[in-house]
Image: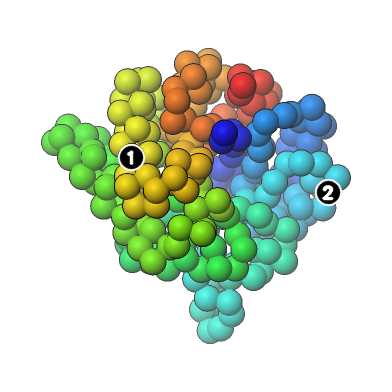
């Protein structure tokens, strides 16, 4: 039995005051949530203030990235210990925008996943193909590589803290959501891969869908066996839109 997750990735949006106000609205409206977890990922600058705002609620805090060292001369980076100190339970790793704009490699993502897990953070590991890759028929090959490399050296005992997000790159921020068939094919593929590598522990890993999720398209997607929730970008920036998605969870 896997509990759902709806996670909002606020990306590079919201001042501290805007973040606190959005978090407060989400906190107030989710007191009755059952069988799942609501997660918000504000920008680094707002993490601590949002953590204070969320105290006394079940809404969890995530960071959008981290550097895979505890501390050191890594100007501009933020460590997993700092994220825990700021109140984070989760960290998004390997988002396609990081892969694309910051050239994050599968190896760097693997270091982050391993470090997050050993530090006690739950990584939300993003994988997904580009438009060109889908059109060339290599979606499964790409996702296979991304998942295997991200999890290289990750043990079976760490599966209960792993979350995978399938985010087709062509669906992110485009309004072009994957069809239920497309999403089902890849989620099923990822599930089989996790079970092949980790046995029954792989069956318990939550796999989220991400890419232009709204309250109108999530209802059908969430009925799919291996879709355990959503990673939401644009629609997580307005309380009503985000809460509308949460209201569709089983
Ligand atoms: C994302 O950034 O992870 C995402 C899924 O964005 P959007 O919902 O805006 O497509």
Determine whether 181 is above or below 140 in the image: above
| Residue highlighted by disc 2 | 55
Whole-percent x, y for residue 72 in the image: 56, 83
The answer to whether 226 appears left or right of 186 in the picture is: right
Residue occupying image coordinates x 64% and y 26%: 246
Observer able to see residue 88 = yes
**Mark in front: 2 vs 1:** 1
The answer to whether 11 appears left or right of 94 in the picture is: right
The numbered disc on residue 192 is 1
* In the image, the residue with mark 1 has its CB under 8 Å from the nearest atom of ligand 1: no
Q: Quadrant of residue 209?
A: top left
* Secondary element at image label 2: loop
Q: Residues within 10 Å of mark 1 (few under 14, many from 20)?
A: some
Q: Quadrant of residue 40?
A: top right
Whole-percent x, y for residue 88 in the image: 67, 56
Whole-percent x, y for residue 145 in the image: 26, 52
Whole-percent x, y for residue 134 in the image: 21, 34
Q: Residues within 10 Å of mark 2 (few under 14, many from 20)?
A: few
* Among numbered discs 2 and 1, the one appearing first in the sequence: 2
Observer able to see residue 238 = no
**Observer-nearest residue: 152 or 68?**
152
């Amino acid at each position: 039995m896997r509990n759902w997750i709806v996670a909002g990735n606020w990306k590079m949006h919201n001042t501290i005051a805007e973040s606190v106000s959005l978090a407060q609205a989400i906190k107030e409206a989710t007191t009755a949530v059952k069988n799942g977890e609501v997660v918000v990922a504000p920008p680094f600058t707002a993490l601590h203030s949002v953590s204070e705002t969320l105290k006394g609620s079940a809404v969890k805090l995530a960071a959008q990235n981290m550097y895979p060292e505890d501390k050191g001369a890594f100007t501009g980076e933020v460590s997993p210990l700092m994220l825990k100190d700021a109140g984070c339970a989760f960290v998004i790793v390997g988002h396609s925008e990081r892969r694309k704009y910051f050239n994050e490699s599968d190896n760097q993502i693997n270091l982050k996943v391993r470090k997050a897990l050993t530090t006690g953070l739950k990584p939300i590991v993003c994988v997904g193909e580009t438009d060109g890759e889908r059109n060339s028929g290599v979606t499964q090959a790409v996702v296979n590589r991304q998942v295997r490399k991200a999890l290289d050296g990750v043990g079976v005992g760490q599966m209960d803290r792993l979350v995978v997000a399938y985010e087709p790159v062509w669906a992110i921020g485009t309004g072009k959501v994957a069809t239920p068939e497309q999403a089902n094919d890849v989620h099923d593929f990822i599930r089989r891969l996790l079970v092949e590598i980790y046995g029954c522990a792989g069956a318990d890993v939550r796999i989220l869908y991400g890419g232009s999720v709204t309250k109108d398209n999530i209802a059908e997607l969430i009925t799919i066996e291996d879709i355990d929730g959503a990673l939401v970008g644009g629609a997580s920036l307005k309380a009503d839109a985000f809460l509308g998605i949460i209201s569709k969870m089983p």
